[in-house]
């Protein structure tokens, strides 16, 4: 359950610390809370992945948005039933809120896959899904 009061209390300090508008801080906090991602991790992830730029792009991987979601990550979320089948990658790129939601959902998927091991989950998130899983477990996806 999302504690709206806690989110609202956190917005100001996180907005000031990361020097982002409060509406952006609110969306990061709200979407992270939906996936039970600690706010410190959520804000640092968005800072590292995009410097809080909703239009950030990496041509080589196709990563886009606040959370640098890739087409491969979206397909993995769809495959396991964590994203609507009809959701398209262009929609994910155009909608910053949706990008945050799917990015944190993808991180939650990785965290669950690695039984709560944040180090492995964050490596998976940053390094690519199937390749990292195979490297760590020795089992192809």
Image (cartoon, rainbow, N blue to C red):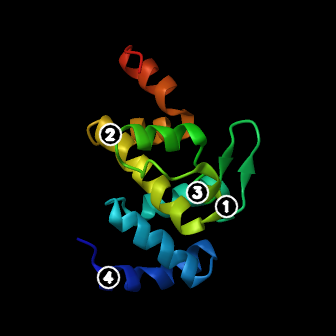
Q: Is residue 13 left or right of residue 16?
A: left
- Separation (CA) of disc 3 from disc 2: 27 Å
Foreground: disc 4 or disc 1: 4
Q: Position of residue 23 (x, y in %)?
A: 55, 82
Q: Is residue 5 visible?
A: yes
Position of residue 107 relative to residue 66, above or below, is: above
Q: Secondary structure at mark 1?
A: loop
Mark 3: few/some/many CA within 10 Å (<14, 14-19, 20+): many
In three-dimensional space, the C-alpha distance between marks 2 and 1, rounded to whole angstroms, equals: 25 Å
Q: Are marks 4 and 2 in contact (CB under 8 Å)?
A: no
Residue at the spot 41% in from the left edge and 72% down from the top edge:
30
> Of residues 62 and 46, which is closer to you in this image?
62
| Residue denoted by label 4 | 4
Graded by Cα atoms within 10 Å as few (under 14), some (14 to 19) or many (20 or more), the crowding at tag 4 reads few
Residue 14 visible in the shown view: no
- Which circle, 3 or 4, is nearer the viewer? 3
Q: Position of residue 78 (x, y in %)?
A: 42, 43
Kindly identify the residue that appears in the image at 31 percent across and 36 percent down: 113
Which dot marks residue 51? 1
Q: Secondary structure at mark 4?
A: helix
Q: Is residue 56 above or below residue 115?
A: below
Give the mark, 2 or 1, whose residue is nearer the N terminus: 1
Crowding around mark 1 (Cα neighbors within 10 Å: few <14, some 14 to 19, many 20+) is: some
């Amino acid at each position: 359950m999302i504690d709206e009061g806690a989110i609202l209390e956190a917005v100001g300090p996180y907005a000031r610390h990361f020097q982002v508008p409060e509406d952006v801080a609110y969306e990061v906090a709200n979407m992270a809370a939906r996936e039970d991602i600690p706010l410190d991790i959520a804000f640092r992830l968005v800072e590292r992945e995009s410097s809080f730029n909703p239009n950030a792009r990496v041509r080589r991987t196709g990563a886009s948005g606040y959370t640098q979601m890739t087409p491969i990550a979206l397909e993995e979320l769809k495959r396991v039933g964590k994203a609507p089948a009809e959701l398209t990658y262009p929609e994910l790129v155009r909608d910053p809120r949706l990008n945050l939601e799917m990015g944190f959902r993808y991180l939650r998927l990785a965290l669950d896959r690695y039984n709560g091991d944040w180090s492995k989950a964050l490596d998976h998130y940053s390094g690519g899904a199937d390749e990292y899983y195979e490297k760590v477990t020795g089992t192809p996806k």
